[in-house]
Image (cartoon, grey):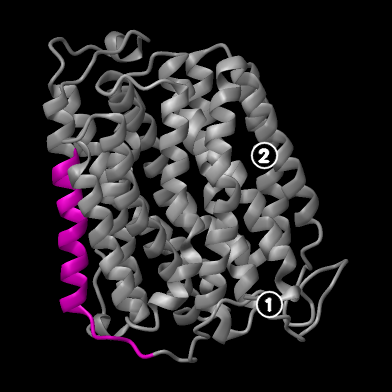
């Protein structure tokens, strides 16, 4: 049986785990129901879903402002407040089933989500030891997967029980059944409140952990981090293909219902509980370069397959495989931890989120229009992005560190500061 150590309140990794458990409760409830909610209740097309997803990414694009917010509030407290804002936005979602209403509640929850993620990445890189960081990050991802599994399991059970007739044939069929607006409202409200309550509990359970290294309170860009920035930029564009259009493909082309989509997310979460810690240990053993090369080779195959798939079952398998590769994103974070100045973690994390979302702001809108012409072209573009990431990953040294940031190109400890 798992037992907490007696001094668990004094160890910041347990706060990271609690926050990692709080975030998925509302975020994944919002995510798994979004396509069905927008199509069944709000009557969205690819155009509206593209606009919504682009608006959702605007706060991510503005994540660089975190460094200025940190002038008036401590990073740990900002992370917890951001979780509360995320929960609030999700809790309100079901009560505003119009385009404008969904755009507003999405922006509210997105501000919370992206500011939490920026703070969380910074705190993780500051608090965890470099030697054990990949393994510990894998465990934290596993905790998040447990929370995701819990909320998705409850959603699956609740929506399945609401069906007039339950059979495996009905679940496997592509016809699906519409879900009532009230069901969406209750689900969003309960999961949003759950995230808010856990964030409040974390505030009172844990002390304020002091910074080991004083963090730079201004926006900085270092030339020697250029490869990290490039990997982050392409990852942001490529990730949108999965988040926005892979799920939309499942609902629009193959007619997946809420229960079917939730079942896929359940499978993803259950797999990550076991898989994410293994990925963390693997990165510790083989290094960031090998892990990233493996990830991008796999993603090229997945996106090409999305473009040509005609079977709903095969598409579901691709969806699970696609999600599996997200665990390898740990390698980009630990690459920064190894090459970066400890004082740069907060600023670089916020700037990285902005870089990650430069493409994310316009990709959903542009590709939403492309989707109306050719859905396959969207996924071929995703494969091209994965190819660029693969090329960049070969430039990651086998043993990265200060002065050894890249194999070819600018490297060195002399910073270039830009505002």
Q: How many marks?
A: 2
Tell me the residue at 18%/46% (across/down).
Answer: 91
399 and 371: which is toward the camera: 371
Tell me the residue at 56%/67% (across/down).
Answer: 351
Instruction: Find residue 181 and report its horizontal and vertical position in percent.
Output: 16, 25
Give whichever of discs 2 and 1 has the lower sequence position. Answer: 2
Q: Which mark is residue 339?
A: 1
Q: Residues within 10 Å of mark 1 (few under 14, many from 20)?
A: many
Q: For marks 2 and 1, give the one nearer the viewer.
A: 1
| Res 317 seen here | yes
Instruction: Find residue 115 and report its horizontal and vertical position in percent.
Output: 39, 63
Q: Which residues are magenta?
A: 188-210
* Quadrant in the picture for residue 92: top left
The residue singled out by tag 2 in the image is 298
Instruction: Find residue 269 and report its horizontal and vertical position in percent.
Output: 38, 43
242 and 51: which is toward the camera: 51
Asked if residue 164 lies left or right of residue 396, the reply is left
Q: Examine the structure image and report whether residue 286 is included in the region drawn in magenta.
A: no
Q: Which mark is residue 278?
A: none
Compared with 162, 169 (above or below) is above
Compared with 363, 198 (above or below) is below
Secondary structure at badge 1 equals helix
């Amino acid at each position: 049986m798992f037992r907490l150590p007696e001094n668990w309140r004094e160890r910041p990794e347990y706060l990271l785990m609690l926050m990692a458990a709080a975030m998925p409760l509302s975020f994944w409830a919002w995510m798994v129901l979004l396509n069905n909610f927008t199509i069944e209740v709000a009557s969205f097309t690819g155009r509206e879903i593209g606009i919504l997803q682009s608006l959702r990414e605007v706060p991510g694009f503005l994540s660089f402002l975190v460094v200025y917010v940190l002038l008036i509030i401590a990073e740990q407290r900002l992370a917890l407040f951001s979780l509360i804002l995320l929960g609030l936005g999700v809790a309100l979602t079901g009560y505003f089933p119009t385009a404008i209403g969904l755009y507003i509640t999405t922006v509210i929850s997105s501000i919370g989500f992206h500011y939490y993620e920026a703070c969380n990445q910074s705190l993780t890189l500051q608090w965890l030891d470099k030697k054990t960081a990949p393994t510990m990050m894998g465990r934290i991802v596993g905790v998040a997967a447990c929370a995701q599994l819990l909320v998705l399991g409850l959603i699956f059970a609740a929506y399945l029980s609401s069906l007039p007739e339950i059979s495996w044939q009905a679940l496997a069929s592509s016809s699906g059944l519409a879900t009532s607006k009230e069901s969406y409202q209750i689900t969003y409200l309960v999961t949003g409140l759950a995230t808010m309550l856990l964030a409040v509990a974390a505030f009172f359970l844990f002390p304020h952990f002091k910074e080991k290294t004083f963090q730079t309170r201004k926006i900085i860009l270092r030339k020697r981090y250029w490869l990290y920035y490039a990997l982050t930029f392409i990852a942001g564009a490529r990730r949108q293909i999965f988040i926005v259009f892979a799920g939309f493909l499942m609902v629009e082309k193959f007619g997946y219902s809420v229960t079917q989509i939730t079942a896929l997310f359940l499978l993803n979460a259950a797999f990550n509980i076991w898989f994410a810690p293994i990925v963390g240990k693997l990165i510790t053993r083989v290094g960031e370069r090998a892990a990233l090369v493996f990830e991008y080779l796999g993603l090229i195959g997945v996106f090409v397959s999305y473009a040509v798939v005609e079977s709903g079952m095969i598409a579901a398998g691709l969806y699970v495989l696609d999600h599996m590769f997200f665990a390898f994103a740990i390698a980009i974070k630990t690459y920064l931890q190894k090459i970066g100045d400890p004082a740069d973690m907060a600023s670089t994390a916020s700037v990285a989120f902005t870089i990650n979302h430069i493409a994310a702001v316009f990709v959903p809108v542009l590709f939403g229009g492309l989707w109306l012409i050719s859905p396959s072209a969207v996924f071929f573009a995703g494969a091209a992005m994965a190819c660029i990431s693969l090329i960049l990953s070969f430039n990651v040294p086998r043993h990265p560190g200060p002065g050894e940031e890249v194999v070819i190109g600018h490297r060195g400890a002399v910073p270039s500061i830009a505002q």
